[in-house]
Every structure is written in structure tokens, then in C-alpha cells.
Image (cartoon, coloured by chain):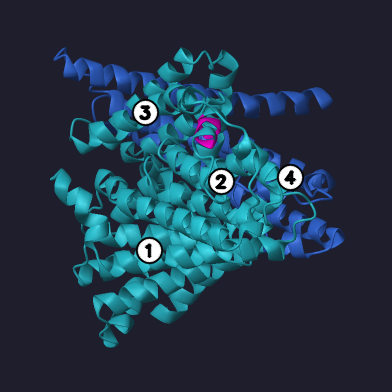
Chain colours: A cyan, B blue
Amino acid sequence: MAWPAALGLMLGLVCLAMLLGLPVAFAFFLTNIVGAVIFLGGENGIMSFLRGSMASIANFNLAPVPLFLVMGDILLRSGMAIRAIDAIDRLILAVPGRLSVVAVSGGTIFSALSGSTIATTAMLGQSLLPEMLRRGYHPSMAMGPIMAIGGVDMLIPPSALTVLLATLASSVSRDKVSVSDLLIAGIVPGLIMSVCFLAWIIVRCWMRPDLAPRDEAARVPLTLGQRWRPFFIDVVPLSFIFIVVMGSMFMGWASPTDSAALGCLATVVLALCYRALTWKILFDSLKNTAVVTTMIFFIIAASTTFAQILAFSGATDGALAEIAKYEMTPLITVFVMIAILVALGCFMDQISMMLLTFPFFMPLANALNMDLVWLGVILLISLQIGLLTPPFGLLLFVMKGVAPPEITMRQVWAAAFPYTVIVFGVLMLVVFVPSVATLLTGAMR
Amino acid sequence: MAVALAFFEKLLSFFCTLFGLVLGLIIVLICVDVALRDLSLGSLPWLIELSEYLMYAGTFLAAPWVLRQGSHVRVDILFVALPKRLAVRLEQLVDLLGLGISLVLLYYGSAVVSDAWRTNMVAYKTWYVSEWLLFLALPVSALLLVIEFVLRFLRVKGVVRDTYDITDRASI
């Protein structure tokens, strides 16, 4: 079979199966079974695919994924995250758009403790949005910051998605993508994004105070102790978790898996100190993590042979040779990758996007000798943009789900738009100034 | 029949709970390993191998429960756009496709296990483990998926809700 037909068959079948609503894992199983029959020699090919599926998830490098998810889940269920948000709320009183600022700053801190984008958005949406709307915040000022900060969670470690990106990219790349390097590389772009969000909110509310009316809470005078005490009790100790996870990795004392396990231990110890942990919370967190982990790992197991079949059928080499004819510079290639991910992100989840595109992206990046950590950060931000772009960006729907019924989808899109532009601006910064992403990893070495 | 269905649901839930507890065990063991290494008291050399096998088996055995919960991530453009009557039919089509895929996995998964049994294949890293034992999770999972897809097909009206709650979407 000619490579365009092979490529069309594999990509077409998996996309059609997904579009029909078949769970992503089963769409990949179906495509790989068909691909194995045609390209890998029938029954033996299917059996080889099934053996390979075990090897793909029996991989210790993936262990940080569930461990980061456990940390976020415990923080959420134990109420520690909400208490931290309340404490930040007390600190920021006179700032224009106070609750929006609380959403971004609290969300940034929670991003540094949780591995889950959806958890951050849902938590902030449920806790802050009703209060913002009640106090007369314009829907765009109420919802936009919450959705935007959910995306930052992907960049600021610990991030389960970063671990997945590094692991999946390494599986199809000549050179390995270091998990710890990529985790650390996301910090600076993530913080720049948060600062840009804050600046946008403050300037916008300063220019148009009607977007976020000054609320009663800001008018009640609080003593210095009343304002700072909750911060030192409910926020500062949480930095212990971040220090344990990132400090141990940054200093080179622990592997990403070790630091993730130590982060879980630190979270449990802190929750016990706050008397916020019960057996039920621990049990529920572990069971919920098992569900999410299964969802992720099952897709990886199902898709394991996808890249191999593409390579074996000649589709990968054929497509890469075709691309090579255009003699694209690394920069143009990166822009093409960004465009593909942003377009796919409108209707697809991030794991599927990575699995479909990385078999082509990574060999291309290898051929052009790109810095894979830099590229990894660019791909992460591109995936993040996909969360915020209509019509099917996931965070838009999470927000619609937690927002009051009178909020329309159009309002949700409009609220996300300025933040999407900011995220795109930071993406361009990383593309043109690679040291933004590689500064910390360079320092680590 | 009701007893059998209740047992089946309990079994699926049990496997998922077990995977959750296994993840907790892995966390504890990694922390112990780090402590042993830092105190120069040795290490747990089998930890990586054990964790890898448990993550693989746990994923496959918990997958049917995740299917039952509707937590396998999927693109839901059509389900949202279609009227409920058509969404029900589409859901049934999806269940039939899932059933077919699971039957293939069951057949060839069993073949992989029997092949490993017949040839006495052994995996060796720090332990000698018979490969058929490692692959066993595959056909067991596939069998449970087959049953669950049949049940989903039969109770499709309960699966397709009146109000499609999109926040229930599975994702990270």
C-alpha cells in the first residue's frame, strides 16, 4: 500500500472512530487492530500489538502521573485548597477586580500543588464564580481568569500532562525528553502568563470599574493580623509541598517519580497537621486517582503500536520526506506544529492530540536538531490554547458546567478570548526567546 | 439475574478500588526506598519492576469500571448535537463497536496467554515471572469489557442522559 493511503487509513480511521464517540482508547484499539492485520502480518501482528501494550504502561517513568494526581485530589477534598484561596482573598483588598486577582494568584499557587487542570478550574469555578457574579462582576471578568488559570496548571509543575508529554515524546524520538527538565522548564513561562493575566485584569478593571464593582468585603477594615494570619497559616505551609517536589528534583537528589512520591507524603503530612485528612478522604482520593490514571494509561496502552504501524507502513517516512521537500526552517516547522495542535485542540483532548501528532513531530524535530525541552514547552502551551478555543475547548465547557444557567456559551467564549490572546503572546515569547523556557534547566545543570 | 448483575458491579468496583490501594502502596514503597537510599541502608531493587507490573495490571483490570462510570475520555460533538432519539442509536452503535473490539482483545489476549504458557516464557528483571501470569490481566479485562458493553447496549437509555452534563467529561 502506498504511504498516502496508509497514512489516510490510519489517521482517517482513528479520527472517524473518535468522531463517532467511541472512547479514545477503543478508537486506537480499533485502528491498531486493523493496522496490525494489514501491515504487521495479521494474527501475529495483533498478538505482538497486545504484548507491546503491556510494555507501554509497565513503565516506571509514568509513575509520577498518578502520584501528582493524588496530591491535587487530597488538597481539594481535604479543603486545604479552598482555605488557601480564602487566605489570599484577605490579603488582596484594595486591588481593582479583587476576586479575579484572587482567582489568578490562588490558581497559580494551586497549580504549583496540583497536577490536574480540570480540578483547578472546577474548584475555582465553584468557589469563586458564584460570589463574583453575586457581587456584580461582569461575566467576562468573572469567568475569564478562572479558565485562563486552569491552563497555567499544565505548565507549572507538578503537572501530570508534562510527565505524559515527556514520556510520549521520548517513545517516538531519537533523543529522550527529560521529565524533570520539562517540568522545570514550564515554571518561568507559567509565571509570566500569570503575571500577564494579573496585569490585564488590574488595568481593565482600573479603566472600567463597572466590570468588577468594589465589594463590601474590601470596605470592612481588617487589622494587619487579620489579613496576614490566614496567609501564614493556610498558604505558607503549602509551599513545603512545592519545595519537596521541585527542590528535590532541582537539586538532583530525586528522580521525578521519587519527588512525586515525596510530594504525596508531604501532602498527607500537611493534611494531618491541619486535621483535614480522614480515611474516607484518602480512600476517595486514591480511588478517583485510579479512575483518572486508568483512563490515561488505557489510551497509552491502546495506542502503543500506532506509531510503529505508521512507521512500518512507510507513512511516517513518506510524510516526513514530503515535508522535507518544502525545506522548512525550524521556526516555520514549529509554527506548523502549533497550528496543527491549536486546530486539533478545538475538538480533541490533549492525550489524543499528542498520540496522533508526535510520531511525526518528534522525528521532524530530531531531523532539525531542535532543543526538545524548548519544543516541549511550546507544545504544552499549544495544547493549553486548545483548552480555551471554541467551539469545543474543554475548559470552556467545564466553566459552562459550573456557571449559572443564564450564562450563555457565547459569553464563556468571549470571556476566554483576551486570555487566549495573552497565552498566544507568551507562546510567541517562548518561540522567539527560547531562554525563557531553558533558563532554569540550564541553571540546574 | 439481579444478584449476578450486582455481583458484576461489585467486582468491577473492587478492581478499581484495589488499583487505588495499589497506587497508595506504590507511594509508600517509593518513600521507603528513598529513605533507605538516603540513610545508606540499601534499597528496594524490585520496586521498579513491581510498580510497573502493578500499574499495567491495575490499568487493565480497572478499565471496565471506568467504562461503567463513563469516564473513558471521548469526543462528544455528535452526542451533544444530535437529538436524544438519534443519540441513543449512536450510543448503541458505539457499544457494538466496543463489543467487537473487546471480543477481538479477548480472543487474541487469551491466545497471548496460552502462547506464553505453552512456550514457558519468563520475564526477568529482578525476579523470574512467568509471562502468562503477567498477560493474564489482558483477557480478564477484555472479558469484563465484553460483558459491560453488552450491558451498556441493553441499558442505553440510562447511559444517554436527558441533559448531557459536559463537565463530567473525563480529562486531566
Up/down of A27 relative to B136, above or below: below
Residue tagged 1: A426
* Amino acid on which the number 2 mark rests in the picture: Arg
Callout 4: residue from which chain? A
Give the spatial CA distance, label 1 vs label 2: 24 Å
> Which of disc 1 and disc 3 is earlier in sequence?
3
Residue tagged 3: A241
Indicate which label's residue lies in the foreground, 1 or 2.
2
Give the spatial CA distance, label 3 vs label 1: 27 Å
Horizontally, is A421 left or right of A378 in the view? right
- Which quadrant of the structure image shows residue B148? top right
Determine whether the residue tagged by mark 4 lies in a helix, strand or loop: helix
Disc assigned to residue A134: 4
Q: Residue furthest right?
A: B85
Residue count near mark 3 (Cα–Cα under 10 Å), binned few <14, some 14–19, many ≥20: many
* Amino acid on which the number 4 mark rests in the picture: Arg
Point out the stretch of residues depicted in magenta: A84-89
State the residue at coordinates (54%, 36%): A89
Disc assigned to residue A98: 2
> Which of disc 1 and disc 4 is earlier in sequence?
4
- Residue A52, how many percent across, how many down? 38, 48
Residue count near mark 1 (Cα–Cα under 10 Å), binned few <14, some 14–19, many ≥20: many
Residue A389 seen in the current view: yes
